[in-house]
Amino acid sequence: MTSSPPIRLAGLTKRFGRLTAVDGIDLTIERGEVVALLGPNGAGKSTTIDLALGLSTPAAGTVQLFGGAPRDAVVAGRVGAMLQGGALLPTTTVAESVALVAAAHRHPLPVAVAMAPAGVTAFAKQKVGRLSGGQLQRARFAVAIVSDPELLILDEPTAAMDVEGRRAFWTSMHELTGAGRTVVFATHYLDEVDAFADRVVMMARGRIVADGTPAEVKAVVAGRTLSCSLSGAVDGFGERLRELPAVQLVDVVGDRLRIGTSDSDAVLRMVLAERPDAHDIEVTARTMDDAFLALTAGVAEEAVR
């Protein structure tokens, strides 16, 4: 054991031709933190994860895991990873896949112990090639934790899982992090960030645009969200709302109007005065979705992986 942080990135840069996927980021993640990595498609999240694991070589900057090279930490079994492109042999069973990875480490968990929190025991004898998308994700999770790692790096871990599967996954993750493990996960499910992350690192165009607790990140978007349904046409009214200085965001989905505002009282009075047909009115605190949209506004989606 060392006192060095599980992850330290310094001046990390990665380019693909003329495209800069990761642009000089500095990031230190301490022991026991559960960190969510957020950003729109093309922000550089997966590229950053590949660089952190030593799967890609940076154009500039350094990566250290536990104070050393990523490969050393991975070989020592101190790092477990669950990647979008992580492949398992389709002709092996789930149990055989977990056992195969366990055999490559000096002090792995028993196969049955690794499979239990991943929720794969019920289909442990099933061939990988016949698994559903959600089952395959859980099998990858079992493979990621069988080395009994101190650091878990998860790229979209609950993709393809249904609501029940996602809930079970995070229940298991809570048990694992309770033992002091460090977890870094990239996700598009912002409710997962609110519920499970201690810290949010938000990326856009290869740079870090926010870094703090979920509450701190949401605080960058002041005010509240007012939403209501309208019986008549919404579009023209939405355009008038966008012109108000107290309004930062207007979304129209069907007959439902969603308004981000720094003065919900004034905007609500205006809505009721102009649209007496407004109903099902709600006023809520701003969400991680609002912070995400505000901090990544104007970021074009580019094909960066």
Image: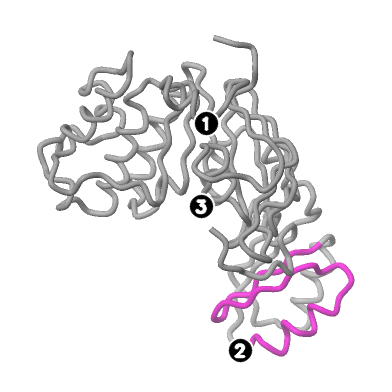
Q: Nearer the viewer, residue 279 or 1?
A: 1
Identity, as a three-letter code, of the amino acid under mark 3? Tyr
Q: Secondary structure at mark 3?
A: loop
- Quadrant assignment, res 243: bottom right
Dot 2 or dot 1, earlier in sequence = 1
In the image, residue 64 lies in the stretch drawn in magenta: no
Residue positioned 77% across, 84% down in the render? 274
Q: Position of residue 50 (x, y in %)?
A: 52, 44
Q: Nearer the viewer, residue 109 or 276?
A: 109
Dot 3 or dot 2, earlier in sequence = 3
Residue 192 as seen in the image, left or right of residue 298: left
- Quadrant assignment, res 99: top left
Identity, as a three-letter code, of the amino acid under mark 2? Gly
Residue positioned 30% across, 33% down in the render? 142
Q: Are marks 1 and 3 in contact (CB under 8 Å)?
A: no
- Determine which residue is flagged by label 1: 183
Q: Please tell me whether residue 266 is drawn above or below residue 237 in the rendered image.
A: above
Residue positioned 65% across, 17% down in the render? 4
Which tag is nearer the camera, tag 1 or tag 3?
1
Residue at the limit of the structure toward the left, as seen here: 125
Identity, as a three-letter code, of the amino acid under mark 1? Val
Residue positioned 29% across, 50% down in the render? 134
Q: What range of the chain is rendered magenta?
A: 234-261
Per the model, the C-alpha gap separating discs 2 and 1 is: 48 Å
Which tag is nearer the camera, tag 2 or tag 1?
1
Q: Please tell me whether residue 242 is drawn above or below residue 91 in the rendered image.
A: below
- Determine which residue is flagged by label 2: 232
Dot 1 or dot 3, earlier in sequence = 1
Picture quarter with the N terminus: top right
